[in-house]
Amino acid sequence: MVLVGSPNVGKSVIFNYLTGQYVTVANYPGTTVDISRGYSKINGKRYEVVDTPGIYSLLPITEEEKVTRNLLCLEKADIIIHVIDGKNIQRMLNMTLQLIDAGFPVMLDINLMDEAKEYGIYINLVKLSEILNIPVVGTMATKKIGLSNLKQLIGQYSYSKKTYTVKFTAELEEMITEIENLLRIDYGLSPRMVALLLLQRDESIHHLASKEFFIAEILTVVKKAATFYEYDMEYVLTVERQMTVDAVCSEVLEYRSTSGQNLGDKLGKITREPLTGIPILLIILFLGLYQFVGKFGAGFLVDYMDTAVFSQYIYPFVKFTIDQYIPWEWLQSLIIGQYGIFSLGFRYAFVIVLPIIGSFFLLFAIIEDSGYLPRVAMLLNKIFKPLGLNGRAVIPFALGLGCGTMAVMVTRTLETRRERLLATFLLSLAIPCSAQLGVILALLSHSPVSLVIWGMYIGMIFTVVGWLNEKILYGASSAFYMEIPPLRLPQLSNIVNKAFIRMWWYFIEILPVFMMTSLIIWCGERSGLLLYLVQSVEPVMILLGLPIETAHVFLLGFFRRDYGAAGLYDLFTTNSLTNEQLLTCSVILTLFMPCIAQVAVMIKERGWLIAAMMIMIILCIAFFAGWLLHCLLYLGKIHI
């Protein structure tokens, strides 16, 4: 069975319930950008359950919508559960009718029924099921209400071809039938839906149809339809289908008066208005990123874990054990030496990075579950326009503050290839991951002037580079639209569970990389290659006004930026850097090349050539920006 529906309607919550597997659930669009698979046993029968990225229509616009439609066409699902938002039923039933028209075995799950009632919307589920001739169930997935009924309907499901069919105008129906009769290829969709998509000039369907024997006749009908109507066919079909939806809704919906706006609605409005929303955003950034992630996570937690736990108990115990039972110096050095896999790799991953990303994931879970992110997107839409983006880019940028790997994948939610390229480049250049950000905020917090200069300098580079890229890359930005969910009080269990799962995923990803990096550096140190590399970059360090020891930080950063951030933390704790050098180093490391995992996703999403070009440009910008800042501080005789 396949779960489909618009973003942010609760598909992933239902997937979690049916399969017992956890996938990220959030109160904003774009959480699911890839396909998740699991299994569920219902009435003794084993089902494969597939969670798909959000889709508004079978005529896809974004990459995530293409992923979902391709899956629907290629995999012959026994059941397709269309999950919709009860309070937006009049808009989302359009997609239900498309799925029925496509010949899919559809079941309708109207989720968020509690929120619909809060808005005075009451739905006659029995009557709707009778009209559409498909099973219909109402659920409140986050509260696990109605999900047992959903399971029961799945177990009893039997596909019927006698479902509701949208009837268009006589002229349209004639052209649809004409195209249907000319089709010979299997598209994974009903001939009627293929005809409708051809009329709407869907690129992938037209590409497949080019192999049809009667392609010339098909294209003649498509051209005839285009000249027959004043507006394009996508608009004409959408309007006519919506008239059908409105007629259905008039029979099954009842509207009752409500007591007015609730507290969530009032807060939601305040967070969207620039006059009140921007100060609220600044307060959240200050309390959340600076105080909680920077001061508490990267400051207190890291210091406590490093000095009170690791240095005092864990390291002495491991060192004593190694000294007692391992007589070989080279093996002792490999495990607990300066670049040992335990003393460096394990310590960086567990003691320095994990507390920072843990505090960030807790903060992010609260923000995303509350529904605040889409409101930030609305606030920043006008700011992003000169950069060739719109407010939807807030989602990948916000995720990038946690982990750039997932953020690059989420750029699929942006409509055009140009926007995806711009967002990927800016993510890789100027959006630090939580470990980097936390370390830098903690290190610079002792000097507010340094922190302000760092923030303004990175912001300026982000803006200038984004503006230049917008001018260089050909194409226009897409219109801004986004689901704005109501503000909700986050559930503590979901926040803790989500933060823990993400910490675990992150930890099992970085620990092997950190261990391998330590091994490579240890080999380099034993062979003399590391000394050679450090000496070879010494002129660059001198040019940047940095001590030679900082070469290690950038060498570590080549493997992972958060690894480099941990190295910078070590330099700071040994008082090896002045405030000016720390600021310069922080700027370069923030702009440094993305981590190995992020590079891999960049290659997957954008291709080898574009990813390589991006990395080369990013390295040049990072060191040029560091050199320019050093010159400004040195020539201006600025002492922080």
Image (cartoon, rainbow, N blue to C red):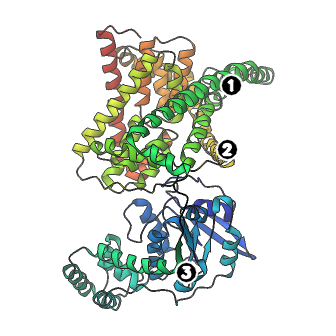
Question: Mark 3 or 2 closer to N-term?
Answer: 3
- Residue 343 versus residue 297: which sits nearer the camera? 297
Q: Earlier in the sequence, mark 2 or mark 1?
A: 1
Q: CA distance from mark 2 to mark 1?
A: 20 Å
According to the picture, the residue beneath numbered tag 1 turns out to be 305
- Which of label 3 and label 1 is nearer to you? 3
Residue shown at 50% from the left, 25% from the top: 441
Q: Which kind of residue does numbered mark 2 sit on? A: Val
**Dot label at residue 128:** 3
Give, as a three-letter code, the residue at label 1. Met
User: Where does label 2 land, which residue?
Assistant: 496
Between the residue at mark 3 and the residue at mark 1, the CA separation in whole angstroms equals 58 Å
Q: Is residue 100 above or below residue 282?
A: below
Which one is nearer the viewer's eye here, 593 or 515? 593
The answer to the question of whether label 3 and label 2 lie on touching residues, with beta carbons closer than 8 A, is: no
* Farthest-out residue, left: 227
